[in-house]
């Protein structure tokens, strides 16, 4: 999607961090933005600041774990701006705990925000984005934790972010013959308010007020992380240049190499397995891109 001027974006988690950074970058580029977030107070403050700078934004307070609220947000955006060109599935949360110690409500909350909400948004927004026939883009904020093992205590977050990457890989294949592009943003450390994620935990998922977002202390890492406004500009570049994987931390490529090394060891092991040798399989040809 080369031409962004006058185009309409819908962004979740737009009141803070990277969602706000994207809103700033997009509006500077002449886009109009429907900012969505569960934190209405912060959302109104962010929108007021942007409007004061001449940005054309509107707000829609919603909880993206509720399917009907995501559909209502899509309808409100079309009513307000006519159509949607760019969908940013950005809001996300985390809570730390060993895989068997996290409560079912912990798992359900993380999966609901980081994974199932993307499913709701694809069904709520994509039919309209395809129907108007103009160029557009879907950007989902996953994480490096969607590609690598983020470490002990990150089970629910890691699983939900791997799901987000997987959904975008498939969506890329499904949209490749349409004017709609797809990107998956996989940030490293970014200096946002994600440490406060528990504040935005809807009541039906219980409470995690007394628990960190990760077992290992990451506050310092995040405080020294990238400026979310830089991520906003990076995402805009990614949309314009049709870049599928958007990374914020090129230094983390080493961790991908290590993951691939471990996967390749698995293939080497399988290649030498006597049962597989005896089964004498042919080469499986499965091209997906
Ligand atoms: N900060 C990092 O280092 C980092 C790294 C990798 C990935 N991420 C991902 O980046 C994305 C953006 O997070 P951030 O770091 O900017 O954090 P942030 O907390 O600053 O922003 C997240 C926003 O999402 C909103 N939100 C939470 N639950 C919601 C719900 N149910 N419905 C609607 N809105 C909801 C929050 O109110 C908040 O404004 C998330 O998906 C996160 O997992 C963050």
Image (spheres, helix red, strand yellow):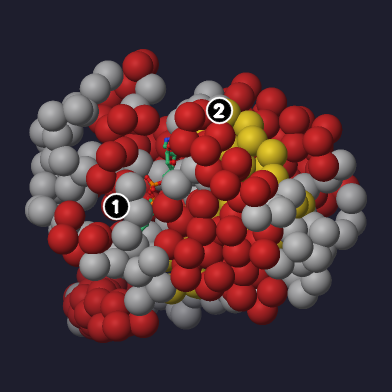
Characterize the local packing of mark 1: few (<14), some (14-19) or many (20 or more) Cα atoms within 10 angstroms.
many
Q: Which mark is residue 158?
A: 1
Compared with residue 14, is residue 111 higher up or lower down, i.e. above or below?
Answer: above
x then y, percent, for residue 101 = 11, 33
Q: Where residue 74 sits in the image (x, y, percent)?
A: 71, 35
Where residue 194 appears, as percent x and y from the top left, is 32, 47
User: Viewed as shown, does residue 134 lie left or right of 271?
Assistant: right
Q: Residues within 10 Å of mark 2 (few under 14, many from 20)?
A: some
> Residue 136 location, x and y as percent?
76, 60
Nearer the camera: disc 1 or disc 2: 2
Identify residue for label 2: 62
Q: Is residue 71 above or below residue 234?
A: above
Describe the element under mark 2 as helix, strand or loop. loop
Answer yes or no: disc 2 within 8 Å of ligand 1: yes
Residue under the image location 42 percent in, 33 percent down? 112
Residue 244 at least partly seen: no
Residue at the image position 81 percent from the left and 36 percent from the top: 80
All told, the count of numbered labels is 2
Q: Residue 188 sits in which quadrant?
A: bottom left
> Residue at the spot x=38%, y=60% of the render?
143
The label shown at residue 111 is none
Q: Going by the image, does 268 lie left or right of 160?
A: left
Whether residue 66 is visible, yes or no, is: yes
Among the 4 quarters of the image, the one containing residue 228: bottom left
Q: Are marks 1 and 2 in contact (CB under 8 Å)?
A: no
| Front position in the image: 152 or 94 | 94
Q: Residue at point 83% right, 33% down? A: 79
Label whose residue precedes the other's in the sequence (1 or 2) = 2
Query: Does 205 sit above or below residue 272?
Result: above
């Amino acid at each position: 999607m080369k031409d962004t001027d006058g185009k309409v974006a819908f962004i979740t988690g737009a009141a803070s961090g990277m969602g706000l950074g994207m809103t700033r970058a997009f509006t500077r580029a002449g886009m109009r933005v429907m900012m969505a977030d569960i934190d209405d107070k912060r959302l109104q403050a962010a929108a007021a600041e942007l409007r004061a700078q001449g940005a054309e934004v509107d707000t829609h307070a919603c909880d993206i774990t509720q399917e009907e609220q995501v559909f209502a947000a899509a309808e409100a955006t079309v009513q307000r701006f006519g159509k949607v060109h760019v969908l940013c599935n950005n809001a996300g949360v985390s809570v730390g705990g060993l895989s068997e110690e996290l409560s079912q409500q912990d798992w359900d909350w993380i999966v609901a925000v980081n994974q199932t909400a993307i499913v709701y948004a694809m069904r709520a927004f994509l039919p309209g984005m395809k129907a108007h026939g103009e160029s557009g883009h879907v950007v989902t904020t996953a994480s490096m934790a969607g590609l690598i093992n983020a470490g002990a205590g990150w089970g629910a977050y890691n699983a939900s972010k791997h799901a987000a990457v997987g959904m975008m890989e498939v969506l890329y294949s499904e949209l490749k013959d349409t004017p709609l592009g797809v990107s998956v943003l996989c940030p490293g450390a970014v200096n946002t308010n994600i440490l406060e994620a528990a504040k935005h935990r809807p009541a039906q998922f219980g409470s995690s007020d007394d628990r960190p977002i990760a077992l290992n202390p990451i506050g310092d890492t995040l405080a020294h992380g990238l400026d979310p406004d830089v991520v906003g500009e990076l995402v805009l570049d990614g949309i314009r240049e049709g870049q599928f994987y958007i990374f914020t931390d090129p230094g983390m490529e080493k961790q991908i190499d290590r993951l691939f090394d471990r996967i390749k060891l698995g293939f080497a092991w399988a290649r030498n397995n006597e049962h597989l040798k005896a089964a004498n399989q042919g080469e499986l040809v499965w091209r997906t891109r």
